[in-house]
Image (spheres, rainbow, N blue to C red):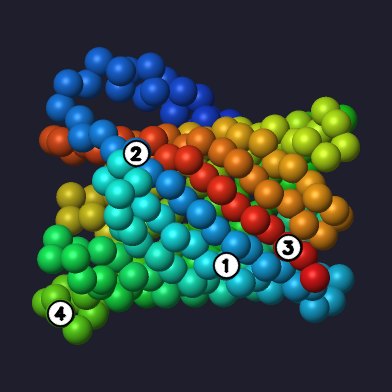
Amino acid sequence: MPHKYMFSIMRSNLLSICFLLLCSTVSVAQVNDAGLWTSINLEKKITKKIAVDLSQEFRFNENISELGSFFTEISAQYKLHKNLSIGAGYRFINKRELDDSYEKRHRMLFDLNAKEKFSKIAVSARIRFQSQYSGVNTSENGKVPDNYLRTKLSLKYDFEKRYLPYVSAETFFHLNNPDGILFDNYRVSFGIEYEFTKRSDIQLGYLIDREVQVSNPWTSYITTIAYNYRF
């Protein structure tokens, strides 16, 4: 089954990330920061197989002292099977620059999602291709996109009706890097989801966002708050 093959790939990536977490503790040239990501996510089911999403997110950095970026994203998903779906979306980003202005960025997203439940543990996997344009009108390379392949594995445990702890790991591969395909970033997160109703929930989490394979890698330690509502 395609979704079981995806889970095998995700498991290998998760083990690789755990190894990198252990190894990276000996790194000496790192830039650290604390951040806060807040978001509101709305989902509307059009049919049994089609759903659309609208998200608004604000990301604070520099020890939560400035708004580093904010974006609006719209996407749609189509269910191929009860455990398999595809999706596509567009994200309009405002990214803070050194002069405190905000650069406009445009990102296209294409997803393949799989999920499976084992007793009280829900496992989900996502493979995402993204293409982002930065500085379209201000840079010589503005019309050349940065293309990434991202793989993400998430586990959620339903030990009570309303409380669902979760953990996830994600890898980033820069596909059109001048030196070839480069694994240059990963994220590990954990937290808890609280369901107000069947339609709404809030997620409180902590995320480690770490750059790798560069001379001065940065690491961000981020608190995340997300409110989700389904129509």
Place of residue 113 in the rendered image (x, y in percent of width and height, measured from the top left): 65, 54
For residue 220, side relative to residue 138 (left or right):
right
Residue 34 disc label: 2
Which of discs 3 and 4 lies nearer the camera? The answer is: 3
N-terminal-most mark, 1 or 2: 2
29 or 7: nearer the viewer: 29
20 or 9: nearer the viewer: 20
Place of residue 218 in the rendered image (x, y in percent of width and height, measured from the top left): 25, 38
Q: Residues within 10 Å of mark 1 (few under 14, many from 20)?
A: some
Q: Amino acid at mark 3?
A: Tyr
N-terminal-most mark, 3 or 1: 1
Q: Residues within 10 Å of mark 3 (few under 14, many from 20)?
A: some
Q: Amino acid at mark 4?
A: Thr
Q: SS at mark 3?
A: strand
Q: SS at mark 2?
A: strand
N-terminal-most mark, 2 or 4: 2
**Mark 4 highlights which residue?**
138
Quarter of image, res 93: bottom left
Quarter of image, res 142: bottom left
Residue for point 23% across, 80% down: 136
Q: Amino acid at mark 2?
A: Ala
Distance, label 3 to label 2, CA atoms, is: 27 Å
Q: Amino acid at mark 1?
A: Ser
N-terminal-most mark, 3 or 4: 4
Residue for point 39% across, 23% down: 21
Residue 55 disc label: 1
Q: SS at mark 4?
A: loop
Residue 229 disc label: 3
